Amino acid sequence: MTPPKKTWEIFRSTLLVVPAVVLFVPLFFLRRLGPMDFWWWMSFNIAAVITFSLLSDRSYPALLKKDLKSGLPHKIILGLFSALLLYALFYAGNELSQIIFSFAETDISRVYSFKQGAATWRIAVLMVFIIGPGEEIFWRGFLQRKWIEKFGSLPGLIMAVFFYAGIHISSGNIMLVLAAAVCGLFWGVLYLRYRSVIMLIISHTIWDLLIFLAFPL
């Protein structure tokens, strides 16, 4: 039986993901909010959870600054290599999934329909300056780090992957949920290995640009 103090600690730590659930579940279900299309709404939500994470942990900005100043060239190389590796995994997975799942092609085309009506340059700018950096600052650098500190490396990783993939369920798109789970696991393991949000920002941003804009599947 879990002690009351431990139960409360688990509950309190899980509450950290509530802002993401509240903001991102409607986003993936509705795709737009009034004048905001998916990309503006996504960027607004990410800005909100970044603000939440920085206000919740006042030591976090100093950690990010230290990360930025330490071994940046090495982190850039690792970020680029990992982005290319993840793209290759998705390229192979795309071919395999369309053999295994009858719905794969339809679901994947629905993911790319998120771009409909949005200028490519605007999507690219938002990915580079808000979406890619923001997701890593919140999901790995804030949530996964907090959960690792409370529960250990493996439980922290599992929780981060579970919630990162889980908020995509409202899209009703199985392939998007699977893709989020793969990405969450990939970047989560990299965070365990290198403890560098800056490296993950580079990896995530480059992968976003490759998979959505430069060489879509």
Image (spheres, helix red, strand yellow):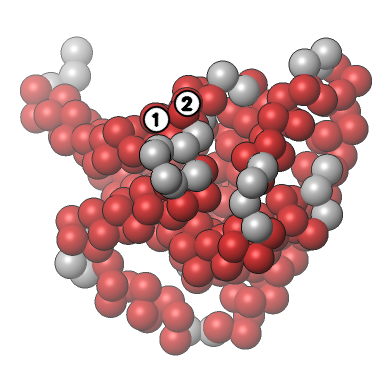
Image x and y of residue 69, in percent: 44, 86
* Callout 1: SS: helix
Residue type (three-letter) at the residue carrying disc 2? Phe
Report the front residue among 3 and 50. 50
Report the front residue among 180 and 199. 180
Q: Which mark is residue 102?
A: none
Residue shown at the point (36%, 80%) measured from the top left: 65
Answer yes or no: is residue 155 visible: no
Which of the image's four quarters has the N terminus?
Answer: top left
Answer yes or no: is residue 63 visible: yes
Image x and y of residue 9, in percent: 16, 34
Q: Are marks 2 and 1 in contact (CB under 8 Å)?
A: yes
- Residue picked out by circle 1: 26
- Relative to 78, is 133 on the left or the right? left
- Relative to 81, is 12 on the left or the right? left
Image x and y of residue 84, in percent: 77, 60
- Residue picked out by circle 2: 29
* Callout 2: SS: helix
**Farthest residue, direction front:** 35
Residue type (three-letter) at the residue carrying disc 1? Pro
